[in-house]
Amino acid sequence: MRRAKPRGSLDALGTNDSRVSAAPHRDRSADVLTDATARPPAPTFAEYVPVVARTVSDSSRRAYSCYWKKVAARWGELRLDEPSPSDVKQLGEYIRGNVVVRRNARGGGSAVENFITALRCPYNQAIAEGHIIEADNPARKVSKPNRPPSTRHAVPDARLAETNQITAATGNDPALDTLLLRLYIVISRLPAVEKKQLHYTCATLGSRIGEVSMATSTSFRISDVARRRLAARAATEGVSATALLDRLIVEGVDQLDHPGIVFRGPAHDRRAGLVAGPDVWEVIARLQELRGSEEHRIAVLAAESELHPRLIRLAVDYAAEHPDDVRRCIEKNRALVDRSRRASRQREALLA
């Protein structure tokens, strides 16, 4: 049981004892008003949003810039501490009502969520820099909208079988399309850990095997005339329009880089050559047979072939940038020559 304090104690006397000088009670509301008065006015959105945009990463700037533009357009002259949570909700609903409707639209909820996230960014920085206090942040007081349930679902077995059947029977390369579809199906059924490991393995192999090139999808517009001519030419050569367009781009850029170079041969055996002259590989093969410095070999070849030295140097420059293509043509020709010689000796032996 606690003992009562004697009546003569200081606590019992309270502050009436003449020996005690009690400090007067301080009104903290006056301190708050004094602090608010001492702090300079908060910057306006038009002043502060560009400052924040220069401090964030490129990815954040791309994600938030469209919302910051809307904020600056409607609240540009307002100070950061002037909008209320109701103002934030009203601007969010305005953005929801003016969102671009796409095929996978979900009612504009994602736009409102992104807007609130974008708005919190300058407010957080303003608090950190002392322009406002946490109580002046209306974006923090507005909750993001709840995300609707996902519409993603598994593909039924019947639809998947139909997709496999159509892929195997149509398209420019059914075998490759079927293989890629099967690979996608297998990967989609892997656990998340195995998917991550597979992605790492593929990336490692891709970095180590420099000779393997993977095609990437690129979208661009061409005129109707170009599209019709491309399709007609592809049908004539018996190749796909994509393969023909890829070849035309590569060869066209090479011709721009090396004026005087042309390309000859069917689609499966394209060769670079000199205008009104031999193929590049023929020039290089003959230079390899000669001896001496590069200029001496060029002079000898020019004398025996009547090719201008400038054209020979053009062939050398092209071969230096495409050594594998030129080497492959030279080796192919040598293999044909060797086979022809063997066949000739076999005929002579047969008739001897």
Image (spheres, helix red, strand yellow):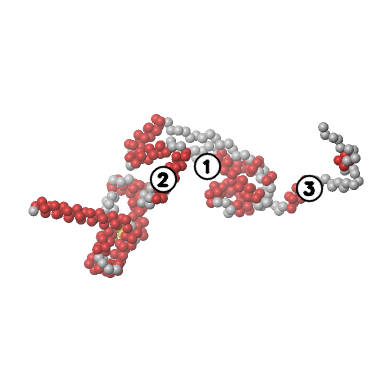
Residue 223 in sight in this render: no
The amino acid at mark 3 is Ala
Please give the residue where the numbered disc 2 appears in the rendered image. 202
Please give the residue where the numbered disc 1 appears in the rendered image. 100
Which quadrant of the structure image shows residue 275? Answer: bottom left
Residue 184 in sight in this render: yes
> How far apart are the alpha carbons under marks 3 and 1?
50 Å
Camera-side residue of 273 and 235: 273
Q: Secondary structure at mark 3?
A: helix
Q: Residue at x 20, y 55 (%)?
A: 338
Query: In the figure, 280 relative to 91: above or below?
Result: below
The amino acid at mark 1 is Val
Please give the residue where the numbered disc 3 appears in the rendered image. 30
Position of residue 92 in the picture relative to residue 311 (left or right): right
Q: Secondary structure at mark 1?
A: loop
Q: Residue at x 55, y 51 (%)?
A: 57
